[in-house]
Image (tube, rainbow, N blue to C red):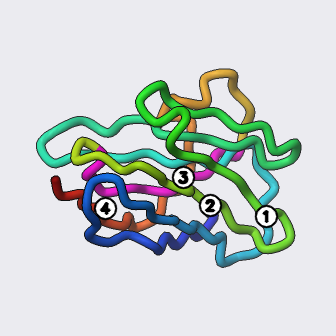
């Protein structure tokens, strides 16, 4: 069981930027993907971005493409989400997740074995 810890959430105005961090505290990740999902208030959980741990290939949802950038540092066992030009509709609890097996469906939450506790991002207009 991978232990994931998120940080970096907060309250910002529309147009501002935030950086989120997710660290595997066991320092022994050997899976295929790490990803960010978010759940806006009153809505279903949705895919945000993912990164292939070994090769570093990244994927972003259409709603955040061009504004958010996901990356990882293997030596630090840490995944990052740089969020620019934030919008009120980005308001959500953001969760870090890790998948231990390969699938082409990297945006499927059922693929992921481990989840962090979540960090709140609130964007005011």
Image quadrant assignment for residue 59: top right
Pointers 2 and 1 in contact (C-beta within 8 Å): yes
In this rendered view, identify the residue nearer to me: 64 or 118.
64
- The answer to whether the residues at label 3 and label 4 have Cβ atoms under 8 Å apart is no
Q: Which SS class for mark 1?
A: strand
Q: Image height check: is 5 above or below 97?
A: below
Q: Are marks 3 and 2 in contact (CB under 8 Å)?
A: no
Q: Which residue is mark 2?
A: 80
The residue mark sitting in front, 3 or 4, is 4
14 to 106, vertically: above or below: below
Q: Earlier in the sequence, mark 4 or mark 2?
A: 2
Magenta segment main secondary structure: strand
C-alpha distance separating marks 1 and 4: 23 Å
Foreground residue, 3 or 125?
Answer: 125
Name the residue that disc number 1 marks.
73
> Is 5 in front, or is 86?
86
The magenta segment is 90-100
Give the CA separation, mark 3 to mark 4.
Answer: 17 Å
Indicate whether residue 25 is drawn in magenta. Answer: no
Q: Secondary structure at mark 4?
A: strand
Indicate the position of residue 99 as horizontal and vertical percent values. Answer: 64, 45
Residue at horizontal 62 percent and vertical 61 percent from the top: 80
User: What's the CA distance linking mark 1 and mark 3?
Assistant: 15 Å
Identify which residue is drawn at 63% across, 49% down. Answer: 70
Q: Is residue 86 left or right of residue 116?
A: left
Provide the residue designation for mark 3: 97
Q: Which mark is first along the chain, 4 or 1?
A: 1
């Amino acid at each position: 069981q991978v232990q994931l810890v998120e940080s970096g959430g907060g309250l910002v105005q529309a147009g501002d930027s935030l950086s989120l961090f997710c660290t595997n505290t066991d320092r022994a990740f050997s899976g295929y993907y790490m990803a960010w999902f978010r759940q806006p208030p009153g809505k279903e959980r949705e895919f945000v971005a993912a990164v292939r741990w070994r090769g570093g290939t990244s994927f972003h949802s259409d709603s955040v493409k061009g504004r958010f950038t996901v990356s990882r540092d293997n030596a630090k066992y840490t995944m990052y989400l740089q969020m620019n030009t934030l919008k009120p509709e980005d308001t959500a609890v953001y969760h870090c997740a890790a998948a231990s097996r390969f699938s082409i469906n990297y945006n499927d939450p059922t693929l992921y074995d481990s989840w962090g506790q979540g960090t709140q991002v609130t964007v005011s207009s």
